[in-house]
Image (tube, helix red, strand yellow):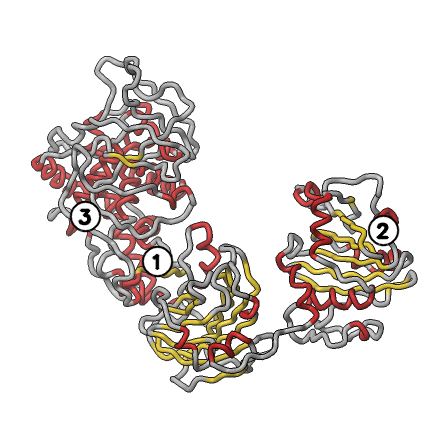
Amino acid sequence: MKRPIDADPTDPAGDVHSPAPGAGSVAPAVLEALAAAVERAMPSLVALIPREPAAQLGRLGLAGPAGTTEVRAVGRLPAAALGLEGAVSRVTSGPVALDREGDGRTIAGPLPWVAAGQPPPPVTHAGPVPMPVPGPRPVTRSGPMREPVPAGAPPTPPFVPSFPAGPAESPVLRELRRLGPMLATRLHGALEVAVERLALPDVPPGLTADVSRPPDGHRTVVLSAAGGGDLENAVIMLDQFCWGVTVLVANLVRALRTHPGVEPLLTPPGAEGDPTPAEAETAVAAWHGRAHLALGVATAAAVLAEVTPPAVIGREAAIVGAGLGAAALVLAEAPMPAAYAAAATARRRAEYLLPRGSVGHVEPAGHRIGLLEEELAETEDAVFAGNGLVAEVPGGAVIRTGTDGGFVSVRLDVLAGPPEDVEVLGWDEVVEISWTSVAGAASVLGRPLDAGYARLGGHLREQTPPWPGELRLRVHVTGRDEWTGGVTVPGVMVDERYQLIVWEAPRGPEIVHKRSDRLGARLRGEPEPPPDDRPERAYRWVRRASISEGATITVIAGTTDIRAVVRAFGANPAAPRSFWDTRASDDLTMRALAVVAVDGAVVAIEDNAFRGSRPEVLAALSRLGRAGSVFWNVSAGPRLGLAEGGEALFDGFEPGMWQATPAAAEPYLVGLDFEDFRDRAEKCLVAVERFTGYAVQAHDLERIEEADVAYEIPDR
């Protein structure tokens, strides 16, 4: 048998795959005998497996980011359930191909979704499961005790540590861990009594001819320190004892599931009575999970009968653990039963409710995002010549973005009928079109994302009605002109936002409710409007600053006495602290102030604090000179404060909200449109500039960050 070779632990493809130890050729006669024995054992095991955990197991093959759909009760439904056959490529294994020397088919590269904590993508391979080759680890010896290894000889099968084991985990252990201890424990409890009595005596020797095991007469030391439950512990120790035996179980399960005697047992029986859509979907998924788990457990029982693991491992836990992990590994790639597509679609439609709304972020691809039932395809700019924003395509609509990198914000609302009003305030362009839903359940899509970013757009997937029909789409956008043609860093949020409103309605004409941005004019072949020169644009730097989520900026004009400003905030100027340490503090009551002297003024910045917005603090500061502050955070504000001569001019004013504008504030708000929800904090900073005579710059914050000095202030 070939032994694993060392892998480079720094290699991102550190899950280097070699031929699975123990996955050598199995004689046809032995395989046939195993199939007959498994066929006899499966029905009694199937009857013991409870419905709900079996359904969870049965839906494993639906997990994946492409060509799938998600609902709360069902999980993810295949593209076929929505009439999108071909959107997911799944390959069914053919006859068993367990190659002794490793020239059989194998997965190329690592299993990246495991390390990222994500469900596996659609499987694109068939054939035997390869065994991962662990990299060097800080252990000197483990597993079966052997004679000293000569220098330069290939390493022995490695120690399998408890979680996280990285590339040292067998694929079966990985899948078992991915199920979680609660599901594994429920299934273990259902089967453990039956497995104690389970025997397949008619299977001749020969299944495990290539499995490495301790030589006769040698002692074996098996160590485990896992906390994932009995099944996980048993599989860890089993992998230590016989490196490769669990993968052999998975390879045999894959081979047997297409055997003429076993395959009919995997087909769900017809529904009895008149089940609800939820009951019908669950029944099909549960049978799919039950049958494969029974297949895995019966196969594991036959394989482990040959290797006879030590009693400390626990026979029934080892059988159920190896069988469950192998079943999960195979279910992740196996196609769902033919009856599942219709059952899943019926359930999805029965449970679909309106209205619904979702928010997320999408990264444009080629200056495009789309509301689509299939993947985003390339389109020419000419398709946007009519309205400059959105164009219907088969199964959805494509939207022309300004940026071609970074994430745009999207809100998607699906309504039961047309919205009462057309909202144009705060938007640059608003266009409404009709489109035909071919299968339903369209998603807001952009550039395909890796696992680390996929969650940002997850709530925008498959939100439109899951049935065909005519729909209206109203697209609102602001910020397309912010992209100036430079390079946008991928993964960064940009100042471009969308609202999409969808409702069912007969096909109607295109309606342009508003057109005002420069990009839209260029696409329509119209003269461009003049550049936006609103004064608040000068403060857009705040959106990209480290304080963007919440801060108070206070300007005190007519003084450069930093110590006096610090004292007015209630802090001790003789007790400086690190600015960055205060930001990173685990103390939830920690509030800190950072100050910098500028041209004839002092700028004070509080990260996610608001002491400078309090009237009594502003009044104290105004004894040094005119003082103005702006406070905002993710759930409140902006709040504007102005003070002069030791007196606050007003208290707690939030422009654009329900309050009347104080008379003392009116001169400083002229020309600032607070009915437009955009840039409200920036508009307040314009008012502070007008009142104090100083415009806060991004450089002021950079100086504070470089100085790394802050002062602790009271949290109230």
In this rendering, the answer to whether 277 lies above or below 582 is below
Q: Quadrant of residue 28?
A: top left
- Callout count: 3
Q: Amino acid at mark 1?
A: Ala
The image position of residue 247, as x and y in percent, is 26, 36
Residue density around tag 1, few if under 14, some if 14–19, many if 20 or more, within 10 Å: some
Question: Badge 2 is on which residue?
Answer: 565
Q: Is residue 212 left or right of residue 484?
A: left
* Pointer 2 with pointer 3, Cβ within 8 A: no
Q: Horizontal and vertical percent for residue 413? A: 49, 71
Query: For the residue labelled by badge 3, is the local secondary structure a helix, a strand or a loop?
Result: loop
**Front residue of 645 and 602:** 602
Circle nearer the N terminus (1, 3): 1
Q: Which mark is residue 66?
A: 1
**Residue farthest bottom in this picture:** 509
Up the image or down, 67 lies above or below 4; here it is below
- Residue drawn at the location 19% of the way across and 54% of the way down: 267
Per the rendering, the mark at residue 193 is: none
- Reading the chain from its start, which is encountered first: label 1 or label 2? 1
Vertical placement of residue 205 versus 613, above or below: above
- The type of residue carrying mark 2 is Val
What amino acid is at disc 3? Ser
| Whether residue 193 can be seen here | no
Answer above or below: position of 60 versus 303. Answer: below
Separation of residues labelled 2 and 3 (CA atoms):
74 Å
Q: CA distance from mark 1 to mark 3?
A: 21 Å
Say left or right for 389 vs 205.
right
Residue mark closest to the camera, 2 vs 3: 2
Q: Which mark is residue 93?
A: 3
Tell me which label, 2 or 3, sits earlier in the chain. 3
